Each structure stands twice: as C-alpha cells, then as structure tokens.
Amino acid sequence: MKYKFFAVLACIALSLCCSCNTDSDKGGFTLPKKINTSNKFRIDGYYYFKKNYALYTYVFYGDGQVIDCCIYWDNFNDIEYLFESGKFYDYIKALKRAWGRYILKDGNILMEFPYDFGSFTKLSTGVIKNNTTLFFSKIQYTDQSGFESLNETLHFKAFSPKPDSTYIGTN
C-alpha cells in the first residue's frame, strides 16, 4: 500500500509540472459558473467509470465545480485511502487542469475542463439517467478541432468527507 501511495504522489507531482493556466485569455471557460440547486443527481460522493481495467473518477460540487481526479486507479480502496489521507487534495488543488465546471440543462449535463495547457477547453455532453448515473456521449473541443464520440457511463459512489471546493481557477 505504501508503494502505491508514493507512486500516486509521484504521478501527481509530475502532473503539477504540466499544469495549465485556465486564467489566460485563451483558456477561459465557456460555461458560466452556476450553483447547482437541483437534486437531479447526487453530489455527496464521487462518480467513476471503468475503462481498460482502470477507474476514472470525478467529484462534483454544489457550486458548479467538478474535479477530474486525473489519476486512473485500479480499485476503490486506493482512491478512498488517498481521499481520506488529505494528501490527494493538497496536490489536486494546485493542478489547474483538474478543475472544471458543470451545468445542468433540460435533463442534460455539460462538463468543461481546460485542455492543451489551457489554450482551449473541452466540453463533454451527457445525460442524467437517474440520480446516481450519468452518461456522456460527446466531447467538443473549443478550438474548433472537432469532437469525439464517447460511451462513458459514470456511476455514483457515496463518500465522505469531500474536499473543500474553493479553487480560484474556475471562478
């Protein structure tokens, strides 16, 4: 377990070296920061999907922010151990490309993150299937390079405590 913990911390530290600047003129968000007052999906934990034996994770907040956890885990124990230790959030708060915005619109969810070192963003389009399942079908790149089709179903897993979401990069 210690080896995995240090390996993950090393990956996070390496990611910090490649973090982007979302506050630049070119890297601004297209989605407005909007408080989520809906109860259409749960935000008292995290969402995940499995792909190629890895777990991809996202943490949504009521203030319209979302964290792409940026590290691809092999089991829930590793994820939750790092969440509980607090070390994960110490690093992720400084990783600008991990912080995005989301809005709900007519039963759909739009999620936006910085891309290409902050020179533009990527906007994922999804559907809220129920209060614990999200389905994303498309990513649009704001640099007009086109879009990718997706087939990602995110499932909810309750978890507490969640980190503080006061990251100024998405304000």
Image (cartoon, rainbow, N blue to C red):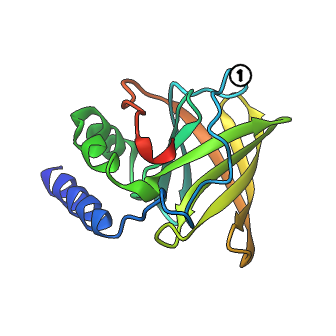
* 146 to 164, vertically: above or below: below
The reply, left or right, for residue 27 in relation to residue 30 is left
Write the residue at 83% across / 35% down.
Answer: 107
Percent of width and height locating residue 25? 55, 63
Nearer to me, 51 or 108: 108
Please state if 133 lies on the left or on the right of 120 as rendered. Answer: right
Can I make out residue 73 in this image? no
**What percent of the width, then of the height, locates residue 36?**
65, 27
Q: What residue appears at the point 26 percent right and 67 percent down from the top-left corner?
A: 14
- Quick one: SS at disc 1? loop
Nearest the viewer among 60 and 116 is 116
Residue at the bottom extreme, as displayed:
145
Compared across the picture, whether 13 is left or right of 20 comes to left
Answer above or below: position of 144 versus 48: below
Left-right relation of 127 to 99: right
The residue positioned 71% from the left and 22% from the top of the image is: 38
Q: Residue furthest left?
A: 2
User: Residue at left 34%, top 38%?
Assistant: 80
Nearer to the camera, 107 or 121: 121
Q: Is residue 40 above or below residue 9?
A: above
Q: Is residue 96 visible?
A: yes
Mark 1 residue type: Ser
Relative image position of residue 57 (x, y in whole percent) = 49, 48
Circle 1 sits on which residue? Answer: 38
Residue 117 in percent (x, y) is at: 46, 70
111 to 17, vertically: above or below: above
